[in-house]
Image: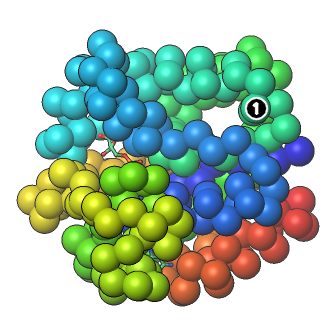
């Protein structure tokens, strides 16, 4: 059973690694960022609350986020294992998660932190673009579409840049997340769950490192 957390600053490649991990291990992929964006597009109460924080690059309050994750972890598809992508981001969230996983009897088996320097992250985030039809993520620098202007996955032609990938918001996202990153890694290091991978390699190599860690557990 794999119940995994992927840690990493914005743009570290958590979503990209998650895609390969889902293919390989058939885990439920739980991205709090994706869940918030879906709630925003549906204009739910959680979405309306989250929007104000996300648009500025700030964190949504811990309790709101933890409640969303708790509800998600009660769903059936998480029984065969899950990836938490983007949660927890604060030690308070990590403590709340401990209570949730104990209550649901779904203990964490591994925490992997994807390490990338800030200058690389800024470039990556400003070059990311997403297919509006299917949500596939690309990058002008590292992962362009095979045919220019056509989504590899669905053939769609409509792409967009995330609002929070604008340079001014990216700076704040990095500042906010960096503050919490070390305490969070320490938290899981003390529990003997933490492994770190070099996220500045090609995505296939990053995945191979993660895969090796998981296959040795
Ligand atoms: P969220 O959507 O989770 O954003 P994030 O953590 O900022 O992460 P990203 O999705 O930007 O990056 P990623 O690490 O997944 O990188 P990706 O694989 O896409 O959260 C958005 C907002 O929601 C937060 O700011 C906050 O407001 C709120 N929120 C979410 N969770 C919360 C929580 N727990 N508590 C409170 N608030 C919360 O890759 C990025 C780009 O790089 C892509 O273009 C990709 O193609 C490219 N790339 C990936 N890997 C590589 C590689 N190895 N080499 C070259 N390019 C690469």
Q: Return the x and y of residue 162 as percentages of the image width and height.
A: 25, 55
Q: Is residue 96 left or right of residue 122?
A: right
| Colour treatment of the image | rainbow
Foreground residue among 13 and 119: 13
The residue depicted at 67 percent of the width and 73 percent of the height is: 207
Q: Quadrant of the N terminus?
A: top right
The residue depicted at 33 percent of the width and 24 percent of the height is: 42
Farthest residue in the left direction? 168
Relative vertical location of residue 37 with respect to residue 217 in this rendering, above or below: above
Q: Is residue 108 left or right of residue 177?
A: right
Category of crowding for the residue at label 1, using alpha-carbon neighbours closer than 10 angstroms: few (below 14), some (14–19), many (at least 20): some
The residue depicted at 59 percent of the width and 54 percent of the height is: 6
The residue depicted at 88 percent of the width and 66 percent of the height is: 215
Relative vertical location of residue 64 with respect to residue 189 in this rendering, above or below: above
- Residue 91 at least partly seen: no
The residue identified by callout 1 is 77
Q: Is residue 143 left or right of residue 49?
A: right
Disc 1 secondary structure class:
helix
Foreground residue among 185 and 45: 45
- Within the image, what quadrant is residue 59 found in? top left
- Within the image, what quadrant is residue 20 found in? bottom right
Relative vertical location of residue 204 with respect to residue 68 in this rendering, above or below: below
């Amino acid at each position: 059973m794999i119940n995994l957390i992927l840690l990493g600053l914005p743009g570290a490649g958590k979503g990209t690694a998650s895609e390969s991990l889902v293919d390989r291990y058939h885990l439920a992929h739980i991205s709090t960022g994706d869940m918030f964006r879906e709630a925003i597009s549906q204009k739910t109460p959680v979405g309306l609350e989250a929007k104000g924080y996300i648009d500025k690059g700030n964190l949504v309050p811990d309790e709101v986020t933890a409640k969303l994750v708790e509800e998600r972890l009660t769903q059936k598809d998480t029984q065969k294992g899950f990836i938490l992508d983007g949660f927890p981001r604060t030690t308070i969230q990590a403590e709340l998660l401990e209570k949730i996983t104990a209550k649901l009897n779904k203990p964490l088996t591994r925490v992997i932190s994807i390490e990338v320097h800030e200058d690389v992250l800024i470039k990556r985030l400003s070059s990311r673009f997403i297919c509006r039809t299917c949500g596939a993520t690309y990058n002008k620098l590292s992962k362009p579409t095979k045919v220019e202007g056509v989504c590899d996955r669905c053939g769609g032609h409509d792409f967009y840049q995330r609002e929070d990938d604008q340079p001014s918001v990216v700076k704040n996202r990095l500042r906010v997340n960096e503050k919490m990153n070390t305490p969070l890694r320490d938290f899981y290091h003390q529990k003997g769950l933490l492994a770190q991978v070099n996220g500045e390699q090609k995505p296939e190599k990053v995945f191979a490192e993660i895969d090796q860690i998981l296959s040795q557990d």
